């Protein structure tokens, strides 16, 4: 496909940074939509002009509205998604619904999970959680059989990435959820690296919890995490990490234990993060309009192109070759990859580097095929320059 016939490129003008850089880092921070300027100005205006009335007129309901906008992208039922600051906070809310002192206290996760998730669950050992870490053999895949075998009758929770941040490997969420449910365990699916680039269907998966954030593939900026709770669980779970936003009648300021509101507020706690919620809406609107199905189709084509070019140069690819098992990123470990990454950044080619992964290239719907070609040509040129610089 040529850039001329790629209709998704019509959105490029909505992202200022694309005018100046080759922006291939949506796995880390999605490009900012131009609409965020207006959203932030409107936020300042309502605060400046309406003061405390802003709560009643807009801010109180914002959490619910943004939750529903995120929920629509994952086919979640209305009012099933609460918003938080980040994934670590979402894990804490989920953990606070359970008790680790009984027989069922095993947490099964993989060493390919994002550190926030790992560090959080490791720290729950002191409250009685038994943490079982399933290890990768190759730094790319999570061995499915080992995950399934580890999930047993004593397993309480399985916090797992949908798409692995290092390698873009897509875990078989369906198989893991099925096994977990068979033995009475719950799955906490982290869709940070999938939602917005790989289709996620909360209802079809029948998953218990989904968490993630909007700053990568949803182009929503930092500060907004989301937590989906399956509605039947949402009605009965009681998060102990709670606060006045979760009360059924917050403005009663009632004394004593909480009386929980219905979801999504039931899973919230203190005062919501209004500016971040305002900032994320333009990105959510664009992603919804573009459609994840279209984004995924393009992503599979562009990530295949990246792999083809890496193969051509003989660089190691730390990402699955099967497009059905690969998210939106291609990790390429060329010689001296950490320094190559620095050089690419100096040339306004926005990528990042991770240990055990290499340089991560993450095109999104707004990237051209020419940008992919020129990014990898730049890598080849940097390596040639480095070779020439080595004294004979
Ligand atoms: C899979 C995944 N989960 C979680 C996070 C971030 O966690 P937190 O929101 O706690 O910063 C990231 C990346 O930043 C990620 O790639």
Image (spheres, helix red, strand yellow):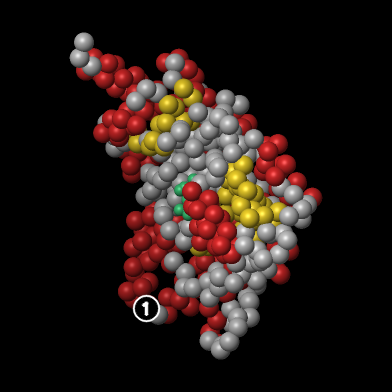
Query: How many labels sit on residues?
Result: 1
Report the side of 298 relative to 344 (left or right). right
Q: Where is residue 128 in the image (x, y as percent from the top left)?
A: 62, 62
Residue located at (34% from left, 76% from top): 49
Residue located at (30% from left, 33% from top): 342
Q: Where is residue 340 in the image (x, y as percent from the top left)?
A: 32, 28
Q: Which of 324 and 164 is in front in this view?
A: 164
Residue located at (41% from left, 55% from top): 222
Q: Nearer the viewer, residue 186 or 195?
A: 186
Instruction: Mark yes or no: residue 293 visible.
Output: no
Instruction: Mark yes or no: residue 39 visible.
Output: yes
Report the side of 279 relative to 201 (left or right). left
Q: Which of 222 and 182 is in front in this view?
A: 182
- Residue at disc 1, CB closer than 8 Å to ligand 1: no
Q: Which of 146 and 12 is in front in this view?
A: 146
Report the side of 11 relative to 187 (left or right). left
**Disc 1: which residue:** 51
Q: Residue furthest right?
A: 182
Where is the C terminus found, in terms of image quarters?
top left
Crowding near the residue tagged with mark 1, few <14, some 14–19, many ≥20 C-alpha atoms within 10 Å:
few
Q: Position of residue 88 (x, y in %)?
A: 50, 57
Q: Answer with the quarter of the image where residue 248 lies.
A: bottom right
Up the image or down, 83 lies above or below 391; here it is: below
Q: Position of residue 138 (x, y in %)?
A: 55, 30
| Mark 1 element type | loop
Residue located at (67% from left, 66% from top): 101
Up the image or down, 178 lies above or below 103; here it is: above
């Amino acid at each position: 496909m040529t850039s001329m016939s790629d209709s998704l490129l019509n959105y490029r003008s909505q992202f200022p940074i694309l005018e100046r850089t080759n922006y291939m880092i949506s796995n880390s921070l999605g490009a900012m939509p131009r609409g965020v300027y207006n959203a932030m100005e409107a936020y300042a205006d309502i605060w400046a002009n309406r003061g405390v009335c802003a709560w009643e007129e807009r801010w109180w309901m914002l959490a619910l509205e943004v939750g529903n906008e995120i929920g629509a992208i994952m086919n979640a039922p209305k009012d099933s998604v609460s918003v938080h600051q980040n994934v670590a906070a979402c894990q804490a809310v989920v953990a606070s619904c359970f008790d680790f002192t009984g027989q069922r206290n095993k947490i099964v996760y993989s060493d390919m999970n994002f550190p926030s998730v790992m560090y959080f669950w490791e720290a729950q050992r002191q409250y009685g959680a038994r943490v079982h870490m399933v290890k990768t053999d190759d730094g790319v895949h999570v061995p499915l059989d080992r995950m399934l075998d580890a999930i047993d009758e004593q397993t309480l929770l399985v916090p797992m990435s949908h798409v692995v941040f290092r390698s873009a490997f897509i875990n078989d969420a369906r198989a893991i959820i099925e096994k977990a449910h068979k033995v009475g365990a719950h799955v906490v699916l982290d869709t940070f690296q999938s939602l917005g680039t790989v289709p996620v269907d909360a209802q079809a998966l029948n998953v218990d919890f989904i968490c993630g954030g909007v700053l990568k593939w949803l182009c929503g900026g930092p500060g907004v995490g989301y937590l989906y709770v399956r509605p039947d669980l949402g009605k009965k779970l009681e998060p102990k990490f709670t606060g006045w936003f979760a009360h059924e009648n917050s403005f009663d300021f009632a004394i004593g234990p909480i009386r929980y509101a219905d979801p999504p507020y039931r899973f919230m706690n203190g005062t919501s993060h209004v500016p971040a919620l305002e900032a994320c809406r333009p990105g959510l609107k664009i992603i919804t309009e573009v459609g994840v199905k279209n984004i995924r189709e393009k992503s599979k084509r562009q990530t295949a192109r990246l792999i083809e070019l890496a193969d051509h140069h003989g660089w190691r690819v730390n990402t699955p070759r099967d497009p059905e098992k690969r998210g939106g990123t291609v990790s390429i470990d060329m010689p001296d990859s950490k320094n190559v990454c620095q050089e690419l950044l100096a040339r306004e080619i926005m990528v990042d580097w991770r240990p055990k992964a290499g340089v991560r290239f993450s095109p999104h719907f707004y990237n051209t095929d020419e940008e992919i070609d020129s990014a990898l040509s730049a890598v080849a040129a940097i390596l040639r320059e480095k070779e020439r610089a080595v004294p004979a």
